[in-house]
Image (cartoon, rainbow, N blue to C red):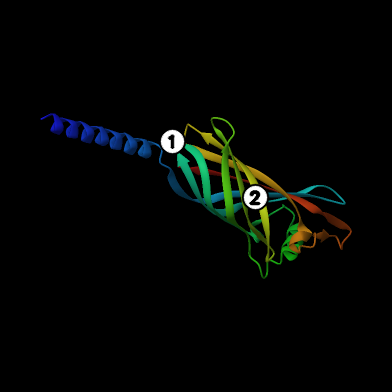
Amino acid sequence: TMTNFRRISVFTAFLALGLTTMSFSLNGSLDKTAFRLQNLNLEVTGTSTLHDWEIKSAKGQAELNLELASDKLTGITGLNFSIPAESLKSGNNMMDNNTYKALKTDKFKNINYVLTAGSVSQVNGTTFQIKTNGKLTIAGTSKETDLVATARYNAADKSYTITGEKKIKMSNWGVKPPTVMMGTIKTGDDITIKYSAKIAN
């Protein structure tokens, strides 16, 4: 009958709409992916009364929770990284020992950062900017700190290369700038922390 035909037509329309909506939702859904990194690199640079200096570590570990949609980075919901303080090396044992003393590594073994909030914005087709706020802990002192990083997508292996840097004052974390040669060489309070890592989906 005409009434049954109309009911079937209405039902078919709703079914088609439902399938279309479901398809859209699946295609537009976010893939929340957890990454565990063993290759976080950290480089700290600064100045002294003698010359500029740098100290590096390639032994950082990190856990990230990222939101991805069709290989595009859309969000960050978790970040926790840790660097063994005594893995930082300058190539000069005297400098290293004074750095460890300033960082109080006998009591505080790691430099940590824990995310409290974060966002991602797309710069272009393969580049994204990650902004985070979190607690950076150095020598046992935690401070709310913002970090900004650039993530570049590598289509060849579907990975992301993340790089960034942050300028801080050591004294804000209660760290007395290291000295060497009986205090005749003094390091400056301002340092730059550079970090980089590669993650694969």
Q: Earlier in the sequence, mark 1 or mark 2?
A: 2
Q: Residue at horizontal 30%, vertical 34%?
A: 17
Q: Residue at horizontal 76%, vertical 51%?
A: 191
- Crowd band around label 1 with a 10 angstrom C-alpha radius: few (<14), some (14–19), many (20+): few
Image quadrant occupied by the C terminus:
top left
Q: Nearer the viewer, mark 1 or mark 2?
A: 1
Depth check, front residue: 148 or 96: 148
Depth check, front residue: 160 or 95: 160
Depth check, front residue: 3 or 123: 3
Disc 2 element: strand
Depth check, front residue: 78 or 21: 21
Q: Amino acid at mark 2?
A: Leu
Q: Is residue 26 above or below residue 82?
A: above
Which quadrant of the figure has residue 196? top right
Residue 4 placement, left or right of 175: left
Per the rendering, the mark at residue 70 is: 1
CA gap, disc 1 and disc 2: 30 Å
Which quadrant of the figure has residue 60? bottom right
Q: Amino acid at mark 1?
A: Ser
Q: Which residue is most to the bottom?
A: 107
Place of residue 63 in the rendered image (x, y in percent of width and height, measured from the top left): 52, 53
Place of residue 102 in the rendered image (x, y in percent of width and height, measured from the top left): 75, 64
Q: Which residue is most to the left?
A: 1
Place of residue 111 in the rendered image (x, y in percent of width and height, measured from the top left): 64, 59
- Crowd band around label 2 with a 10 angstrom C-alpha radius: few (<14), some (14–19), many (20+): many
Image quadrant occupied by the N terminus:
top left
Q: Residue at horizontal 48%, vertical 45%?
A: 67
Per the rendering, the mark at residue 42 is: 2
Per the rendering, the mark at residue 197 is: none
